[in-house]
Image (cartoon, helix red, strand yellow):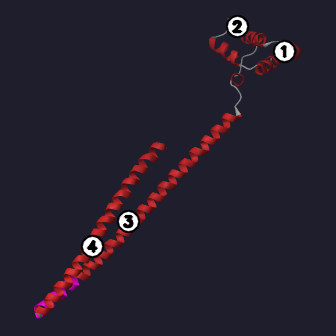
Amino acid sequence: MDTLSDQQRENIQKMSDERLRQGLSAAGMPAAAISALARPALIEAWAELVATGRERPTQALTVPMADTELEKRRLDFEERKWQEQLKLENDKWQEQMMLENQKLKIEQEHQNLEREKVQLEQQRLRLQVEAAENPAALAKNMAMLYAVFLVVCQMMQQICQLSSKMLNVCLRTCEFLVLFRRNC
């Protein structure tokens, strides 16, 4: 055993009794002689074979068999990892859908405001014509314009609130994407 490298000695010491017996049997030692040997004698016999070059410990003999519990834990880990990735992708998709819905709502509000703007412009022009014709109609139209102005102000306030919500959604999406990239 003294002629072996440190790595070879370490690998032989790590081998189980069963692996040592299998290796000695494969090298041609009689089964009766192998079964009579204790662990130190098994190690010494195998080391002698390795030292003389008649048998080298193969990689398969030095690596312990796969532990089924370890394999099960690895598979469980892979499954959890896959489920987490699927959940992250699902969350990302839901976040994108929510963002798209917010964009559609804001776009609809914008279209409504544009329509309202066109109507107000038409009404303003009509009022200008009427005011030039009748001072009493001018006072009535001014009250109506003021009411329309209040409605437009309320709509602008709603758009500002929706824009703020959309900005928050965009920020959450960016934060989510940063977390998603870190986890991948």
Q: Secondary structure at mark 3?
A: helix
Identified by mark 4, the residue type is: Gln
Residue 29 visible: no
**Pointers 1 and 3 in contact (C-beta within 8 Å):** no
Q: Disc 3 designates what residue?
A: 103
Identified by mark 2, the residue type is: Met
Q: Disc 4 designates what residue?
A: 154
Q: CA distance from mark 4 to mark 1?
A: 95 Å
For marks 4 and 3 on the same chain, the one whose residue lies earlier in the sequence: 3
Q: Secondary structure at mark 1?
A: helix
Residue 25 tag number: none
Q: Disc 2 designates what residue?
A: 1
For marks 4 and 1 on the same chain, the one whose residue lies earlier in the sequence: 1
Which range is magenta? Answer: 121-133
Q: Disc 1 designates what residue?
A: 34
Which residue shows up at 87% across the image and 17% down it? 31
Q: CA distance from mark 2 to mark 3?
A: 77 Å
Which residue shows up at 36% across the image and 54% down it? 171
Residue 157 screen position, x and y as percent:
27, 68
